[in-house]
Image (spheres, rainbow, N blue to C red):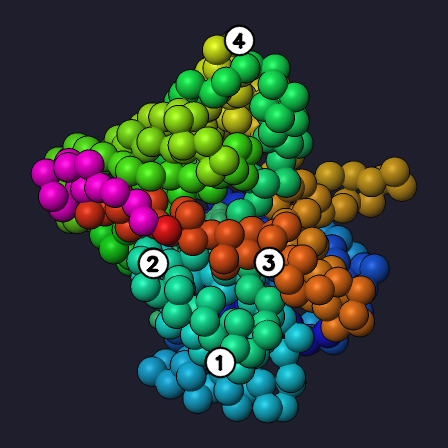
Amino acid sequence: MNILIVGSGMYVTGRNGTGTGTILSALAQFSKTNTITEVVVVSKSLESENEVSQATIRINKLLKTNLKVSFHALGDSSQQIISTLNNTKIFDSCIISVPDHLHFMYGKICLDLAIPTLMVKPLTPTLAEAKELIKIADKNKTFACVEFHKRYDETNLWIKKAIHENKVGKLNYFVVNYSQRIDIPLKTFKGWSSQTNIFQYLGVHYVDLIYFLTRYIPIRIAAYGTDGVLKQQGIDTYDSVHAMIEWVNPNDATNKFVSNFNTNWIDPNCSSALSDQKYNVIGTLGRIECDQKNRGVELVTEKTGIQQINPYFSDYLPDENGELRFGGYGYTSMQVFLKDVMDLKSGNKSLENLNIHRPSFRESLVSVAVIEAANQSLKNNNEWIDINL
Ligand SMILES: NC(=O)c1ccc[n+]([C@@H]2O[C@H](COP(=O)([O-])OP(=O)(O)OC[C@H]3O[C@@H](n4cnc5c(N)ncnc54)[C@H](O)[C@@H]3O)[C@@H](O)[C@H]2O)c1
């Protein structure tokens, strides 16, 4: 298969020792058991070419693979270049990993060409954009999915089962605490952090997760932001965003719960992990406490300070023969997408089935509706905003 990647940032290539380059590593690992003829990376400017080539060499060496990756700069003619490339390569799928505000533009280009698409979260910042993309995907009978990897984390799958086995009784509330180090908006995503906020960029993961765990529907939201620290340093976004969301059981309008989100983008850089994430599920019969940062492995050195390690997301670990294998729920998420694309082609799976059972664009309307309403509440004096799906 030929695969197109749009974007060449941290999630694709890894950068300065932060991140493995989940997307290229996943494709290299996948190529060990499936044929990938070529990967074409397109990104804004030629400056990224070296980064992509260095990452490919590093990953191929680590995994003993031979992934063939080429690079094209898009400049101002994205649509024309992607369309021309697709005429010769015929892309079997594409993975879009660009800043949030560009998701719609690239999603539209790829779906207009009927290329099965995996989009990094959030699908789009607005419902109108998300609905437009779904319309194109439906018209072209093209699979379109969001890379919500938390749906593949075993911890979350255990919690999903526990909720459905009624272990904690009727759901009363969720609490989500999710923070990232200040260097992420200040340095890593400096070019675009002002165009998003921490709830839209990170909180969306847990909005989708709560929907995935419970299947309840969000009906209204009120959001509150604090600011000052990032603004003083030239980044026009909130330091933290707090949101209360009311959810209803679609089969029983009297059965509701609330979720409280605290999302923060100014954690100290000496925090023991890039992301600090915890959530609780509280019901009438009990509670579930889930620490998604402290997974039980701690590294302490003079150079790094105290670090909590998550070996379950996206890492190279030795296999049974002592060779490095790329794995984790970040890999599972991409592997499932690529297998789905192959199964659709061979007729082993139907698009209708995948649209229901995967974090498809249609499934992701819920999280888009919540972030859009959160942004409206932030603009409108923290008013409650109804969510109409
Ligand atoms: N870093 C992660 O671990 C991670 C995980 C999941 C999802 N994501 C999502 O992936 C997306 C990108 O994140 P990242 O970490 O790679 O960011 P990044 O800032 O490192 O990279 C952004 C990439 O987009 C490219 N780009 C910018 N403007 C462009 C344009 N107009 N046309 C084409 N390309 C353009 C840049 O050249 C760069 O390659 C975000 O939506 C983020 O939410 C990131």
Three-letter code for the amino acid on which mark 3 is drawn: Asn
Report the residue at 10% width, 38% height from top: 381
Question: Would you place residue 52 above or below residue 246 in this image?
Answer: below
Observer-nearest of 48 and 373: 373
Report the residue at 17% width, 42% height from top: 378
Instruction: Judge whether residue 236 can be spotted in this image.
Output: yes
Residue tagged 2: 127
Instruction: Judge whether residue 276 can be spotted in this image.
Output: no
Observer-nearest of 327 and 340: 340
Query: Could you tell me how far apart the alpha carbons at marks 4 and 3 are, in whole angstroms?
Result: 34 Å
At label 2, counting other C-alpha atoms closer than 10 Å, the crowd grade (few under 14, some 14-19, many 20 or more) is many
Magenta region: 377-388
Task: Name which quarter of the figure residue 247 lies in.
Answer: top left
Residue tagged 4: 285
At label 1, counting other C-alpha atoms closer than 10 Å, the crowd grade (few under 14, some 14-19, many 20 or more) is some
Q: Name the spot of residue 262 as percent of width and height, x first.
A: 31, 28
Q: Name the spot of residue 91 as percent of width and height, x first.
A: 63, 78
Three-letter code for the amino acid on which mark 1 is drawn: Asp
79 horizontally vs 193: left or right? right
Query: Could you tell me how far apart the alpha carbons at marks 2 and 1 are, in whole angstroms?
Result: 19 Å
From the viewer's perspective, is the residue at label 4 or at label 2 nearer? 4
Choose the circle earlier in sequence order: 3 or 1.
Answer: 1
Which residue ends up furthest to the right in the rendered image? 321
Q: Which mark is residue 355?
A: 3
From the viewer's perspective, is the residue at label 2 or at label 1 nearer? 2
Regarding mark 1 in the picture, which secondary structure is present there?
helix
Three-letter code for the amino acid on which mark 2 is drawn: Leu
Query: Could you tell me how far apart the alpha carbons at marks 1 and 4 are, in whole angstroms?
Result: 49 Å
Q: Which mark is residue 112?
A: 1
